[in-house]
Image: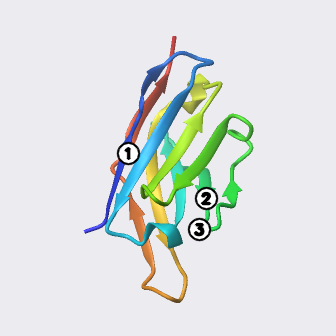
Amino acid sequence: QVQLVESGGGLVQPGGSLRLSCAASRIIFSIYTMGWYRQAPGKQRELVATITSGSSTNYPDSVKGRFAISRDNAKNTVYLQMNDLKPEDTAVYYCNARYSGSLFSPGDYWGQGIQVTVSS
C-alpha cells in the first residue's frame, strides 16, 4: 500500500520558517509529480506547490517567493521550505503524489496531513 508520511509541522511565529518533508513508499517516486496542498478551517483545499518528475515547479501567487518545493529521488522524499510565514499560512498541509502517464498505471495519493500554525 502506498504511503505518504509528512513531518516537520508545528507552531512558528510570524516571519519564521519551517521545512516540511514527505516520505513516499511503494511508488516509483521519480515518475510522480509531487505536490503540497493546504486546507484552513472552513476553506477549500488549495494548491501550495508542485514539482514534476523533471523538477519543474509551480506556485500560486500567495506563496511565490516565500515557499520552495524540492525533491530527492534517492530518498523518495519531497520537501517544502516555508519562509516569512504569515498567520494566513496556518492550515493542515497535505502531501500529494500524482501520475497520469502512459507507461504505468495512473495514481493519485495523499498523505494524512500535518498542522502548521503561524501565531505569536
As measured in the structure, the alpha-carbon distance from the residue carrying label 2 to the one carrying label 1 is 16 Å
Question: According to the image, label 2 marks what residue?
Answer: 51
Q: Estimate how packed mark 1 is, as few (under 14), some (14 to 19) or many (20 or more) residues with alpha carbons within 10 Å.
A: many
Q: Amino acid at mark 3?
A: Ser
Indicate which disc residue 77 carries.
Answer: none
Indicate which disc residue 53 carries.
Answer: 3
Question: At 69% from the left edge and 55% from the top edge, which residue is drawn?
Answer: 58
As measured in the structure, the alpha-carbon distance from the residue carrying label 3 to the one carrying label 1 is 19 Å
Among numbered discs 3 and 1, the one appearing first in the sequence: 1
Question: At 43% from the left edge and 75% from the top edge, which residue is drawn?
Answer: 107
Percent position (x, y) of residue 105?
A: 42, 85
Looking at the image, how many numbered discs can be counted on the residues?
3
The reply, left or right, for residue 64 in relation to residue 20 is right
Circle 2 sits in a helix, a strand or a loop, which is it? strand
Percent position (x, y) of residue 60?
A: 70, 48
Q: Quadrant of residue 109?
A: bottom left
Percent position (x, y) of residue 102?
A: 53, 89
As measured in the structure, the alpha-carbon distance from the residue carrying label 3 to the one carrying label 2 is 7 Å
Question: According to the image, label 1 marks what residue?
Answer: 6
Percent position (x, y) of residue 3?
A: 31, 60
Determine whether label 2 and label 1 are within 8 Å by CB. Answer: no
Q: Quadrant of residue 21?
A: top left
Q: Estimate how packed mark 3 is, as few (under 14), some (14 to 19) or many (20 or more) residues with alpha carbons within 10 Å.
A: some
| Nearer to the camera, 43 or 61 | 61
Question: At 53% from the left edge and 15% from the top edge, which residue is drawn?
Answer: 13
